[in-house]
Image (tube, rainbow, N blue to C red):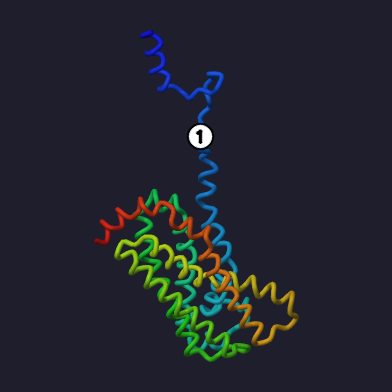
Amino acid sequence: MKANVYDKGRASDGPPLNEVEKPVPRKTKSPGRTGWATWLVPAALILLSFMPLVAGALRLTQLGGGPEIIPANPRFSASPLPVIIHIVTVTVYAILGAFQFSTRLRQRRPGWHRAAGRILVLCGLVVGLSGLWMTLFYPRAEGTGDLLYALRLLFGSAMVMSIILGYAAIRRGDVTQHRAWMTRGYAIGLGAGTQALTQMVGSFLISQPSELSGALLMGSGWVINLAVAESPSVQLISKKNDFGMKANVTTQYA
């Protein structure tokens, strides 16, 4: 009996057994698959912003005296500083912000996440405010009607307010609200990437977009991004591992 009891006790230290008392192979995580999934979301976000970032780089080259690869814009040439600031900060905001959506990176390098977050708050505010400045004080581009003008003011203000509310939330230790507001701000900031796609689709459906249809195509880019940001799947990802983060945040900002 003692031998049987001893063997039974030792059995719990070994691998689990199936119905025929044979070892069940343990499931192991694939390092390659985990690493691939870690960079999937940041890569997708950077890809979405690729076309506007390339256009911005070409515009900076042109304003710096380089060749006119894209059509010149007299509004920017007359007052280049606001658009230069806007392009530089939105480039940092789009690329650096994409990596904030990697859960594994946030868990393994919380210090990096906080440092990058501070840079993103500053860049995001400059992006939103410079966009509002250009809307208010640059002459309207051809085809810009009252609707598009109002949409730019609306979403530019919403981006600035989202970043401010997200920063206020993390200061009081509310990780869930922080991520929700920062996701909304980033979604608005990446509107130009989605607008490139909506305008491409619109050019196939409408041979010559009108002032109204052009404004609706631009507005749909912001709406689509916000709809994705508010979707249950994205909200679930943003809330993942919130409990483990709250203790660090409370200590950091208390």
The outermost residue toward the left is 254
Q: Which residue is mark 1?
A: 28
Q: Is residue 77 above or below residue 110?
A: below
Q: Nearer the viewer, residue 57 or 124?
A: 124
Q: Image quadrant for the C terminus?
A: bottom left
For image coordinates 74% across by 74% down, the residue present is: 204
Q: Nearer the viewer, residue 52 or 106?
A: 106
Q: Secondary structure at mark 1?
A: loop
Determine which quarter of the picture holds residue 49. Answer: bottom right
Q: Nearer the viewer, residue 110 or 130?
A: 110
Please provide percent x and percent y for residue 145. 59, 90
Q: Nearer the viewer, residue 180 or 114?
A: 180
The tally of labels here is 1
Please provide percent x and percent y for residue 228. 55, 65
Q: Give the residue type that dot 1 points to.
A: Thr
For image coordinates 58% across by 62% down, the residue present is: 47
